[in-house]
Image: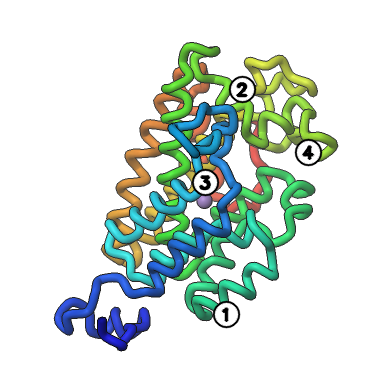
């Protein structure tokens, strides 16, 4: 064993030509860090799944999402710092807030920590519950317009992984309500039926898709499901469009590749959302409106 441990920067400067490993020990450390930090964290909606074998816990480990996100970043050509940030992108938001952010900075350095913070929805879980869903998601899409390239790669890979998971969940549960129940786990559903454990933020008449809920609270379940599905697709399409603009302007190859991967995932998502009775034209019209009006104009009634 060599005593020389390449730092991420050494690796990106010298790479394979110098006979160094493609990923350094910092990446291995990030793997361990992610597994440990998310040790008790399950993928949403998998809590009741039966154990996969002796010693296996109920549910799908959350780290699967982090491994997938990091793999997508590396496959697209992102560097090690971006891939490490991908492994850690949910750790601040889900597992420890600001204290966690400080620890990530200590262990993995400023570059990785900055990307992780950029990818964190909120460091304070109470903010997230109080904010209106549409406002929060719009802020994310706007964020894509200014984020640095490593952050963009992680954001794009995160969306690919999540969109694929939604599609897989709907398809594996078509025996119940045609898979529609998956969309009842999302915030717009809770908001539209006022079921947010005192946290629901009812749809406003100026929100997109308001009329899909019948404009009343609580809405009937089918309306609330369609509302949630339309909102979800709107968000993914809006992020995709914003990423496409950044990819086009920058000609940054890893981002172009990953944006294409996201495009396929969003097409699949649109198929399952359409099957629930949501009109895709309505969603597309909203995405276009938002993109053209820079998120400032009032949203027209759908
Ligand atoms: Mn994530």
Q: How many other residues sit within 10 Å of disc 3, few (<14), some (14-19) or many (≥20)?
A: some
Q: How many other residues sit within 10 Å of disc 2, few (<14), some (14-19) or many (≥20)?
A: many
Q: Residue 201 carries which label?
A: 4
- Asked if ligand 1 lies within 8 A of label 3, the reply is no
Q: How many other residues sit within 10 Å of disc 1, few (<14), some (14-19) or many (≥20)?
A: few
Q: Which residue extends farthest front?
A: 54
- Say if mark 2 contacts mark 4, CB within 8 Å: no
Q: Which mark is residue 225?
A: 2
* Rendering coords of residue 297 (x, y %): 65, 48
Between marks 1 and 2, how big is the CA–CA gap? 43 Å
- Say if mark 4 contacts mark 1, CB within 8 Å: no
Between marks 1 and 3, how big is the CA–CA gap? 24 Å
Q: Which of 100 and 35 is in front in this view?
A: 35
Between marks 2 and 3, how big is the CA–CA gap? 25 Å
Helix, strand, or loop for circle 1?
Answer: helix
* Rendering coords of residue 247 (x, y %): 35, 60
Q: Between label 3 and label 4, give the one nearer the viewer.
A: 3
For marks 4 and 1 on the same chain, the one whose residue lies earlier in the sequence: 1
For marks 1 and 2 on the same chain, the one whose residue lies earlier in the sequence: 1
Q: Which residue is drawn at 66% across and 50% down?
A: 136
Q: Is residue 149 visible?
A: no
Q: Which residue extends farthest left?
A: 17
For marks 3 and 4 on the same chain, the one whose residue lies earlier in the sequence: 3
Q: Which residue is drawn at 77% across and 34% down?
A: 196
* Rendering coords of residue 224 (x, y %): 66, 22
Q: How many other residues sit within 10 Å of disc 4, few (<14), some (14-19) or many (≥20)?
A: many
For marks 2 and 3 on the same chain, the one whose residue lies earlier in the sequence: 3
Write down the residue under mark 1: 106
Write down the residue under mark 3: 62
For marks 2 and 4 on the same chain, the one whose residue lies earlier in the sequence: 4
Count how many numbered circles sit on residues in the image: 4
Q: Is the residue 180 above or below the residue 94 in the image?
A: above
């Amino acid at each position: 064993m060599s005593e020389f441990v390449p730092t991420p920067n050494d690796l990106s400067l010298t790479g394979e030509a110098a006979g160094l490993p493609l990923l350094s020990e910092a990446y291995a450390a990030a793997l361990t860090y992610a597994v440990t930090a998310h040790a008790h964290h399950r993928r949403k909606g998998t809590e009741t799944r039966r154990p996969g074998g002796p010693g296996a816990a109920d549910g799908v480990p959350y780290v699967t999402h982090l491994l997938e996100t990091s793999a997508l970043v590396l496959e697209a050509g992102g560097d090690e710092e971006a891939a490490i940030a991908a492994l850690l992108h949910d750790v601040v938001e889900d597992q420890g807030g600001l204290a966690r952010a400080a620890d990530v900075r200590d262990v993995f350095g400023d570059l990785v920590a900055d990307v992780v913070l950029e990818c964190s929805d909120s460091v304070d879980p109470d903010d997230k519950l109080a904010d209106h869903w549409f406002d929060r998601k719009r802020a994310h899409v706007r964020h894509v317009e200014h984020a640095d390239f490593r952050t963009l790669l992680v954001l794009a890979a995160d969306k690919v992984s999540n969109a694929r998971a939604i599609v897989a969940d709907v398809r594996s549960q078509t025996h119940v309500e045609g898979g529609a129940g998956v969309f009842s786990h999302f915030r717009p559903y809770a908001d539209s039926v006022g079921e947010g454990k005192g946290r629901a933020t009812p749809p406003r008449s100026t929100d997109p898709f308001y009329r899909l809920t019948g404009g009343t609270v609580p809405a009937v379940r089918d309306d609330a499901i369609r509302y949630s599905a339309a909102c979800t697709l709107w968000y993914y399409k809006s992020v995709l469009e914003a990423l496409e603009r950044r990819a086009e302007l920058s000609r940054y190859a890893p981002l172009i590749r990953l944006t294409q991967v996201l495009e396929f995932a969003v097409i699949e998502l649109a198929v399952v959302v359409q099957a629930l009775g949501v009109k895709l034209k309505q969603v597309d019209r909203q995405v276009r409106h938002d993109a053209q009006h820079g998120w400032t104009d009032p949203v027209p009634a759908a």
